[in-house]
Image (cartoon, helix red, strand yellow):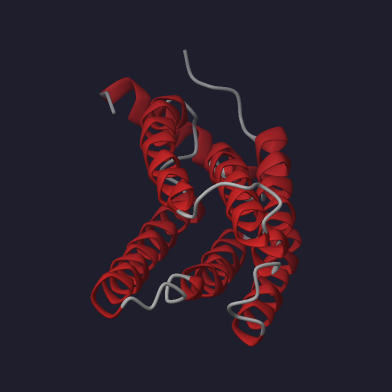
Amino acid sequence: MTRDEVLQDLAYARALAEEGRHAPLIGGSYFVLFGVLLAISYSAQWSVLSGAWPVGQQVIGFTWMGFGAAAAIGVTLLSRRVRKLPGGAAISNQVDRAVWNGAALAIIACVVGAVLRAMVTHDFTAPDAIMAAGFGLYGVAIYASARAGGHPWLQSFAWIAWAVSAALWFFMHESWTYLIAAAACIIVLIVPGIVMLRREPAAMA
């Protein structure tokens, strides 16, 4: 950030403090991006596993490779947009970035472990654990952001994420759980993401 951007950010945070308001969360676009990509990928995997899409299961691997490429491009583009928004220095947004970065690293660790197990032991059900763990981590990140930023409306989405995680652990290896996960992405990620986007401050010139 430039000196002028830092000063504008601080002025914005000061104005919020004087008005007794909490800084809006500015990560809504990431919620929507990953919510959409995950919903599409989970739906595709369900359709392959259930036979609704009569193709070979190698398509699942290509689906997730496409997810990774789209996510990388999307994050790169959105980071430029988010940097222009005031409020990045607010504690709520610092916590939001930190907990989501931590959750992302934890999910990557789950992916690496599950994929390696599938390759070494030929247990191709191992990756089913990724989405169950993922929703648990989404809940942790959402709850931390809600508590740190004073956004109680967001906490309910954390509880939904945890409920989905518990269900996915219980019904693991059922093909229809991927369809449930796709629907849950709309509720847990896309819906709060849209709310955050609507509450975002205007971008700095």
Horizontal side of 157 relative to 172 (left or right) equals right
In the image, 87 versus 126, the foreground residue is 126
The mark tally for this picture is: 0
In the image, 162 versus 124, the foreground residue is 124
| Residue name at image x 28 percent, y 80 percent | 121
| Residue name at image x 69 percent, y 73 percent | 164
Task: Identify whether 190 is placed above or below 172.
Answer: above
- The x, y position of residue 192, in whole percent, is 70, 50
Horizontal side of 165 relative to 137 (left or right) equals right
The quadrant in which residue 28 appears is top right
In the image, 69 versus 104, the foreground residue is 69
Q: Is residue 23 visible?
A: no
Going by the picture, which residue comes out furthest to the bottom? 170
- The x, y position of residue 76, in whole percent, is 36, 31
Horizontal side of 23 relative to 204 (left or right) equals right
- The x, y position of residue 167, in whole percent, is 69, 80
Task: Identify whether 151 is placed above or below 176.
Answer: above
